Image: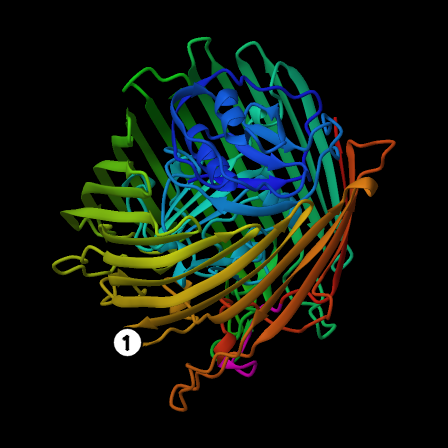
Amino acid sequence: MIAVALAVAAVPEARAQANNAYNFSIPAKSRLAALADFTAATGIQVVHQGAGAIGGTSQVVSGRYPADTALRTILAGSGLNYRFTGPRTVAIEAPGAGGGAVAGGGIALDTISVTGAGQGIGRDGVSEINITSVDIERRNATDLKGVFRGEPSVIVGSSLPMSQKLYVQGIEETNLAVSIDGSRQNNKVFHHNATTMIDPSLLKAVRVDAGVAPADAGPGALGGAIAYVTKDARDFLPNDGFGGSIKSTFNFNGNTSTNNLTSYTRQGGFEALGSFTYAKGSEFKAGNGQEVLGTATNFLSGLGKIAYQSLEGHRFSLSHEQMRDDALRPFRANAVQIIGGRPTPLVRPYTLDRQNTVFTYTNESPDGWWDPKFVLGYNRSKVAVDQYTGATLNTYSYTSQGISDSLNGKLENKFAFSIGDVIAGIDFYRDRAEYTDVSYRTMEKADNVGAYAQARLRPWERTKLSFGVRGDHQDFKGVNGFRSSDQGFSGNASGEYELTSFLTAKAGYSHVWAGVPLAENYVQNPAWVYGVGPKSVTSDNATAGLVAHYGDFRFEGGVFRTKIYDARVPLWAANQALRAFDVQTQGFHVGGTYNWGDGFARVRFARTDAEVDGKPADTYLGQYLTAPIGDILTFQLAHTVVPWNLTFGGDVEIVFDYDKLLNPVTGIGKLEGYEVLNAFVEHRPFALPSLLLRGEVRNLFNRNYAARGTYGLEYGTGVVRPLYEPGRSFLVSAKLDF
């Protein structure tokens, strides 16, 4: 599934190879929906240059045609023109607009869910969330919380990027199939740390399959899947040449400076891209005016990519992405302090290193049924933590290390039919989780081989179907030489049906077999007794919803439920290697969007209830499984004043009180709600349109709060001092393209 980003944009002198032919099966429908189907078939994003509403009904486009022929047919009679601005972008403009749009443009008007696009970001799904590069730029994201801001179905807990936990419809991300550039991630190192920390400035797009995920999303998609895709040189250069950008952001709350340098080139069939980010700053202040301990910034990340594409369309690419977070953090990095128990220093050094290397082969000019893709990836995450001895644990003793890595790959082929396509392939992973210190070393391993097939079809004019199956065989090895093997099948089915010209119904179901998950590195114990061995984890997901289009309005709503069985969460004690829980999350989401020529307004609401073994979830097990979330309402607004090259907007997040945790025996208590307002303004000087200036304020009303999903919220400040979010923060940014 591909998101069609309606946005103001301009890429100087950009041209695309519009004569590439694609298979189209687009019935007569609203032009906006037809353009969504165009993107699904081609992977070409459609952007709107402030030409007014895209209305009316398009003609039928059925058969194999060049992209520009299909566009001419869709826009025939609308009075609108189109202009290719890049290899995978086309601008819709009013007559006479030509190349005079606002350079570099500014705002995403909305994302339109599109089905049937095949591989990569955007395939199919009934509860998908697509974050485009325009979304990331508009939100000026500096961490995962910023990437998903305004998406109430995706919650990111903690104010500290290196300890942020991400939840999709309540399910913690280690229970999802997570990939970066197609490479499976194995990042469950230490429950006090983030699972997947990534630099948003490197991202091109993010796709989330919430709940029901297709078979080709990879193994282990218990609660869905997340696919991160990083930038390519061809995203910036439609033809041979050289370019780049310099961006600097300064946050006055903590005096944090974040700087990015990106450069790229294309020559002949060769491409190269390099991107480097460095961030440095002090501890920030919460809404109560107090500095939040251990929140200083010391971050470094980089991305390098090289690629070659032959005249026949054979494309080979190699990418390496790496990040490092190295600073003093709270003794337990996901909470400022746990009061009581053994005395500890308030802060200690943490070092988090993560790297991801991926080789990919694709055929950009497939012939008939031969449309292969090969991916081979390796990723590694390491956490190093200082350990202390003495009566008050104040004497440095040694540094412990947890290392998780994954060697993985897949070989698949897409078979194109007149009514859709089928992707079939095989994949594998070899995951390891290792802990070392001065006294012992432990390791668990898992090897998995899978085979899968996923069909995405449009068998009838108003119907879309997607269904798939995969089988996996896993060999598991424990810390003391214990071995076991198991195998299982996973299946999914989903569909859409156009009830009327403006109303579409969606529904989907999946059953997932995920094998045995590896234990977190820092709880592994060489004295563990596995007995008959841990059980394989399985899940069932169901979702259903409606989507309505009426002119420039879009309305949507849906319900969901995820059940995970035998989710493994071991403890260090010798008899706790097999500890497991049953997890359930359920709820609903509703929303609406109104687009106008130069802006959009959007509102979304999501309710998420979570249980573990039939009891309300808490944030302790939330570090592994699910967390108390409740009701969340978001608003987003953005508008471009075209004559002034000025864009302004903002977003509001309202999180309601959550009292389902009240328990006088355990002391688990109510979660307080909060409201946060963020606003921004951007301007491109007419004399220098390659320069983008931005000012923004986050948490305008200076609320003192800890984000939902943060560890320790329900225990009270007398037990746990949680990581509060930054108070009112002023940021200024400047970005220069060259």
Question: Dot 1, crowdedness within 10 Å: few (<14), some or many (≥20)?
Answer: few
Quadrant for residue 25, please give it: top left
Evaluate whether residue 140 shows in this view. Answer: no
Look at 56% across and 76% down and name the residue there.
673
The span picked out in magenta is: 715-724
Q: Which residue, as the protein is rendered here, is positioned at the far right?
A: 687
Evaluate whether residue 685 shows in this view. Answer: yes
Nearest the viewer among 604 and 260 is 604
Q: Secondary structure at mark 1?
A: loop
Reading the image, the residue beneath label 1 is: 614
Quadrant where the image shows the N terminus = top left
Q: Is residue 497 left or right of residue 480?
A: right
Q: Is residue 246 left or right of residue 202?
A: right
Residue 716, above or below 360: below
Nearest the viewer among 318 and 355 is 318
Q: Which residue, as the protein is rendered here, is positioned at the far front?
A: 77
Q: Is residue 549 left or right of residue 483?
A: right
Q: Amino acid at mark 1?
A: Gly
Nearest the viewer among 421 and 278 is 421
